[in-house]
Amino acid sequence: MKELEGKVKLVVKFFPYRYRDHARIAAEAAVEAWRQGKFAEMHELLIKKSPKLDRESLIAYAKELNLNVEKFIKAIDNMEGADIIERDLKLAKELDLYVTPAFFINGIKVLGVRDADYFKNIIFRELENAKQR
Amino acid sequence: MQSRGSIRVFLIASLVFACFLCLNAYASERKKSIEPLPQPPSPKYNTTTPEKVELGKKLFFDRRLSGDGTTSCASCHDPEKTFTDASEISLSYPTTRNFRNAPTLINIAYAKSFFWDGRAKTLEQQAEFPIMSPFEMNQNLDFVEEEIRIVPEYREAFRRVFGQEVNIKLIAKALAAFQRTLVSQNAPIDRYLRGDKNALSDEAKKGLEIFTGKGKCIKCHHGAYLSDQKFHALMVPENPKYANEEKFIVTRRYVAKINKYPDYMNIKEDLGRYFKTKKKADYKAFKTPTLREVAKTAPYMHNGIFKNLDEVIEFFNKGGGEGNRELKPLGLNDEEKRVLKIFLTEALSGDDLKIKPPEIP
């Protein structure tokens, strides 16, 4: 996606699915990884390793990414990311969102798993529209 | 002598019978035509009334119908996406995977069977399946009755509309009544068939000729619904994207298993209607979908394998999938394919239905 560099801003919001045991703690892990500057790496790892997202596994992933593990453990145990996660859950409710993954591309709602072409079509169309404005 | 006479009588009778069959087939080929859309049916067992439709609309958008409260009928049949979800494989209950494409609900009132494999004969029967399917809404039917019944507005509405307490059969009836109102509006083909010869452009008219002639589309896509309402094994290829996806495989095995397919653990393909009927003729056969609104309901086929109409036309032009016995190459040239696509896009698309989610009690 090099061609989109500098043209698209990606904002990630948290929406831990309420009926999955490890969804909330995994979100905490992602927030702490973000605070330590490795959100994207942790995000990739969580997707790759899912559903193995229990506390011990998350700590192992933090080690794998060379995070400050002591700080990481303290953060996930004390739910230090709660403010951010709760804020995002509130936003999802306001937007009437219940499904993951959910995307908004320039306001266009896309729900569910899609292939890359689907996103590309919308993104390139929106970039074109933006040029004409 | 008597035996020779009998043979002669038998031969003459066979010849007459063969002629009858030929004429019959010729007549049925000839009478296939496209018809304008009539008023949608309002069956005696569930007449359509405005109050019932209103109730059905609320239930259609109500997430209580799913086990975890995340999914409504509108999640996969989104009014903003022509009552589909625009996915190859329909959206699924969280953490699971569906294995077939969600068809549009527009004009579903005219269908004579439901689902790609036709396992439901009425819209009322159909409604219960996705609610209880583990990979769609994953709700328990007894439980959902209580979830709806406890809402005072719903209880009152059911008494008013049906004169009865909430139950799952009435929920299904209300949903069906709402869906029967989702009908193509003002489609150029209907105006054309009713006498407005300017309703189609010249190119669309040429496309119509291909549709009814060389393209042979009309063979299966005829009548007002533009479907023969039958099942055909066109040998549409499996969608390779999902061949190794565990959750997809789980769902396909599950469907084979509940249909008592003996070797369900090793199932590698979607056997379509065969799962249900176990008839050889239904092996990998799927329902002929309507072509009304087709330009707005990509991707196509039961597994969403074709991204656009060009790919669909190409599939039929080359004579369908490998090993199929229903289709032969059509030999359409580029211009013929182009005008056919114009017909499908321009003539069969009605005005967008502006259905907004209602307030859920």
Image (cartoon, coloured by chain):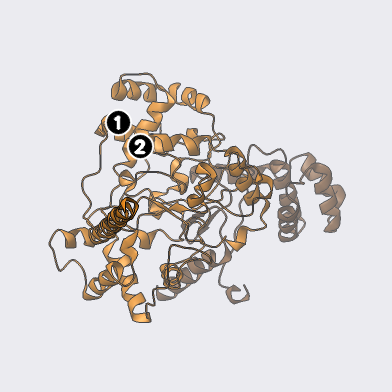
Chain colours: A brown, B orange
Chain letter for the residue marked with disc 1 in the picture = B
Q: State whether residue A126 appears in this view.
A: yes
State the image coordinates of residue B183 (x, y, percent, origin top left): 28, 48
Report the quarter where the N terminus of chain B lies: bottom left
N-terminal of the pair, mark 2 or mark 1, is 1
- Vertical order, B77 against B196 (above or below): above
Answer left or right for B240 relative to B187: right
Q: Could you say whether the residue bearing mark 1 is in a helix, strand or loop?
A: helix
The three-letter code of the residue at mark 1 reads: Asn
The residue nearer to you, when weighing B29 against B44, is: B29
In the rendered image, residue A118, in percent from the top left (x then y), is placed at 52, 64
For mark 2, name the chain. Answer: B
- The image quadrant of residue B81 is bottom left
Q: Quadrant of residue B350?
A: bottom left
Instruction: Give the residue type at disc 2.
Output: Ala
Q: Which residue is mark 2?
A: B176
B197 is higher (above) or lower (below) than A61? below
Residue at position x 26%, y 69% from top? B208
Secondary structure category for the residue under label 2 = helix
| Residue appearing at x 38%, y 80% in the figure | B334
Does residue A15 show up?
no
Q: Quadrant of the C terminus of chain B?
A: top left
> Where residue B257 sits in the image (x, y, percent)?
62, 40
Tag shown at residue B46: 1
